[in-house]
Amino acid sequence: GMYVGFLYILNIFIFKINSQQIAAYALWNYVPFFLAAFILSPLSMIYFGKKWATFGWGVVATAVLLNLSLLLRITDNFPENCTGAVFTAFTACSLVAHTCSMCYSIGGATLNADLVESGEMRTGDRNEGVLFGFQNIVDKAGVGIGSSITSSVLQPVGCLTYPTPGLVSWDNPVYRPHLRNMIHIYLAIRAVCDFLSLVLLLFYKIDRQQHAHNVATAARRRDARAGGNSISSQLGCMAAQVAEGGG
């Protein structure tokens, strides 16, 4: 949520990315989506499993790549604003970062999906609607709360709460210290949140075999309640056999 609050300021005042460039950059977002959804994320999950593939993408994306352009900027290793090179460098950093970030997001979604059968094993009820509905509520609440308190975080440290386009920019030495402080705050908040999310991921205990066992057991329970040999039971048994065979 705070990232959304900072995004406008970061793009406009630190990199001076104009609306036309933002539109052009938005078109390139299809490339990370295609690479993540159809190539990188599935292959990494096959070779490393869902949990560790997701953890690996999370470490790479959140610890390094998502902050790469800002780190290069505050260390004065980023191209000067208002040049063709700055948009090229910004787009290249963002495309690589978003590819890893999408792999991380896809992995997280698949891990959440596996919780459906785990919950059914514990409660006897299948509540995927409640699970994903509650997740959406939490996500939206986080974005809303984080966006609303962004200005409150910036005020005590001397950052500009209501910057003026054209006057405030990284190229202006008067405002550069304020923008540098803003970057430091953003990086600190992101580091804490990302660290906590990765630590929580380590407590995820459902591996491929356990998930297949949960699917098969839940299917047999549903079949027993239905009083017949249902298709879901047959599919669950097939999933267990594939998992036991290393598939």
Image (spheres, helix red, strand yellow):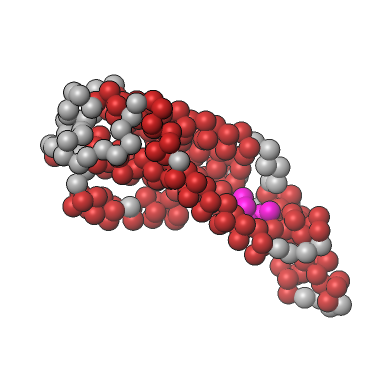
Secondary structure, magenta segment, majority class:
helix
Identify the image quadrant of residue 180. Answer: top left
Left or right of residue 1: residue 46: right
Q: Position of residue 156 (x, y in %)?
A: 41, 27
The magenta-colored residue range is 111-115
Residue closest to the eye, 141 or 238: 141
Q: Position of residue 73 (x, y in %)?
A: 27, 28
Considering every residue shown, the one lying at the far left of the view is 83
Identify the image quadrant of residue 229. Answer: bottom right
Left or right of residue 246: residue 56: left
Q: Position of residue 190 (x, y in %)?
A: 46, 34
Residue closest to the eye, 21 or 180: 180
Residue closest to the eye, 204 or 185: 185
User: Do we see residue 100 in this rendering?
Assistant: no
Please say whether residue 116 is one of the residues in the magenta stretch.
no
Q: Residue at x 68, y 53 (%)?
A: 115
Count the numbered circles shown. 0
Q: Is residue 194 above or below residue 123?
A: above
Left or right of residue 71: residue 237: right
Q: Residue at x 62, y 52 (%)?
A: 112
Q: Residue at x 49, y 39 (%)?
A: 57
Q: Position of residue 213 (x, y in %)?
A: 76, 55
Q: Residue at x 47, y 43 (%)?
A: 146
Q: Is residue 9 above or below residue 77?
A: below
Please say whether residue 114 is one of the residues in the magenta stretch.
yes
Identify the image quadrant of residue 127. Answer: bottom right
Q: Is residue 185 above or below residue 90?
A: above
User: Do we see residue 51 in this rendering?
Assistant: yes
